[in-house]
Structures are given as structure tokens and as C-alpha cells.
Image (cartoon, rainbow, N blue to C red):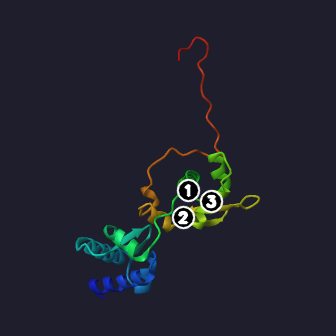
Amino acid sequence: MDREELQRIIEAILFAAGERVEVSRLAYTLEVDEADIIAAVDELANKLAFERRGIRIIKLEKGYQMVSSGEFADFVTKALETRKPPKLSASQLEALTIIAYYQPATKAMVEQIRGVDSSYSISALLNKKLIEEAGRLNVPGRPIQYRTTPDFLRTFGLSSLEELPPIEKISFGEPIEEVQTPKEGEGC
């Protein structure tokens, strides 16, 4: 199949899906190499952006999603009466930040860093679909681990977690290096 036909098919799939579609799934479905899928989608996304169309294709981690153009957000919101992005309290934002940087993270880890109970914040983030369960930790009690969702990326305008600004992370379970104090007669 030629590039234009491939782009039309991908466009139809992304439109119909309404959510992110993995590159590997597109490649498998269309029986085309992943590199060809990426090249076709990137070309299509550039074409839509160049022509200032009402839709865009964005990359989310290892997949693509069709979305409405940001420049028309006010019109789309008004026409569809959609909600604004979820409002987050300070405690929810703290919990979300910890999960985003340390994922998969348990509630206990979030509480250890924050120093307060985080049950309500984690429950609210789950309800807002900004985080999801990511399995259970293989320790006694088997606590639930959480990770961010594609909705988190969309809400914060990120294409992957690698775009998060760097922070100094706290290490868990590693021995703390002893601080060397000067001996008598040595200067600081």
C-alpha cells in the first residue's frame, strides 16, 4: 500500500478509536513495519498542523491519538459543554507528583514522603482517571501500586513522562552515607 493510503487508514483508525492507539497495534493490524507507521503518522500530523486543521494527531508514549486543535478549544468546550481539566487540591497535586516521579508507587510511599494520610487524595486521583492501579507489590500485605494514565499526560500537555522536569529524588531503603567529621587538629 502507498503512503497516502496508509495515512488515510491510520486517520480513520485514530478517529474511530477516540483514544491512544499503540504503534505496535497499528503495525500489526496493517501488516506494516513500525517505522513506516511512525513515518506515515508524523507526516500526517505535520500536514494537519501545517494546514491549521481542526484536528491534530499527538504522540502519547508509544502511541498516537487524534485530538481537536488547541486553538479551537473554547469553541469545542462551548459546543459540547465539556468540563475543564480536573481541579486538583494541593494534597492531590502532591500525591500525583509523587506517583508521577516514583511510579509505580504505593500509598505508603506517598504517605511516607508527604507525612500525612493520603487515602482521600489517591481515591480522588483514581476517580479523575489521572492514576490507575499498576499491580501489587510483592511484599507482605501486597499493597497496590499506582501509575499515571494517558489522561495525566493529556491533562498536563505531555507526550511522555520523560518530559517531566527533573527533581532530586529521595532514595528508599539505601544506606545513608556517614558524614566525615574533622578529627582533632584538622581544619574544616
Residue 122: mark: 3
* Rendered view: 180 above or below 61: above
Amino acid residing under circle 1: Leu
Q: Which quarter of the figure has residue 1?
A: bottom left
Residue closest to the far right: 140
- Compared across the picture, whether 145 is left or right of 96 comes to right
Tell me residue 130's x, y (percent).
Answer: 54, 64
Closer-to-camera residue (181/84) = 84
Identify the residue position indicated by label 2 in the image.
130
Look at the numbered discs 1 and 2 and tell me whether their residues touch, using CB distance below 8 Å.
yes
Identify the residue position indicated by label 1 in the image.
96
Sequence-first disc among 2 and 3: 3
Q: Secondary structure at mark 2?
A: loop
Tell me residue 110's x, y (percent).
Answer: 63, 52
Amino acid residing under circle 2: Leu
Residue 180 can be seen in this image: yes
- Compared across the picture, whether 150 is left or right of 141 comes to left
Amino acid residing under circle 3: Ile
Q: Secondary structure at mark 3?
A: helix
Closer-to-camera residue (173/99) = 99
Real-space Cα distance between discs 2 and 3?
Answer: 10 Å
Q: Residues within 10 Å of mark 1 (few under 14, many from 20)?
A: many
Residue 67: mark: none
Closer-to-camera residue (3/124) = 124
Q: Residues within 10 Å of mark 3 (few under 14, many from 20)?
A: many
